[in-house]
Image: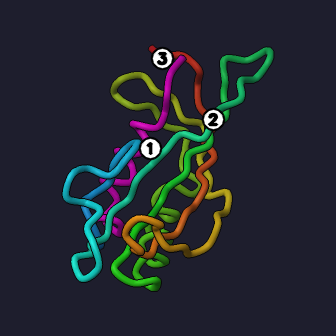
Amino acid sequence: MVDPLGYILTIIRADAGVAAITTRVRGGEPAKGDALGPGLYQPFVVLARLGHQRQKRLPVQEVRIAARCYGVTFQGASALAGAVSDAVHAIGPQTSAGGVGIWTAFDDGGEGTLKDPDTDQPYEVIIIAVNAADRPIA
């Protein structure tokens, strides 16, 4: 089954609004040097797949992705979350070079601004709902 997380990551990373804030957009977990302690915070985004649901009679799936948008401040985390939302909200249809077909993607809400329990860095979570093919599109 096709996982659209990588393609969504590419869309977010290529967005001018996100790139104006950070080029650090990761899948799964922060890269070494992303999550630093107080006084060394920097903006970055981590995408994590929350799960999926396949349609019963169509080769389509809905995949839910959490985007944790870390900022230097609470306002910075919210600004980054807004930029990520703008990058993915109401996109589609499109197909990646690798055959990942996206019909639609939407910002489906989030949890508000929080503090990372390990670093105390502010972050905001948005949930991205992606309607995608469940197999490569030729």
Magenta stretch in the rendered image: 1-19
Residue at 29%, 79% (x, y): give it: 38
Q: Quadrant of residue 36?
A: bottom left
> Residue beneath label 2, please?
51
**Mark closest to the chain's N terminus, 3 or 1:** 1
Q: Give the residue drawn at x 45%, y 85%.
A: 75
Q: Nearer the viewer, residue 127 or 122?
A: 122
Question: Tag 3, which secondary structure?
Answer: loop
Most distant residue in the front direction: 118
Q: Residue at x 31, y 70 (%)?
A: 43
* Three-letter amino acid code at the position of disc 1: Ile
Location of mark 1 (residue): 8
The prevailing secondary structure element of the residues shown in magenta is: helix
Earlier-in-chain disc, 2 versus 1: 1
Q: Which residue is mark 3?
A: 136
The magenta stretch spans residue 98 = no
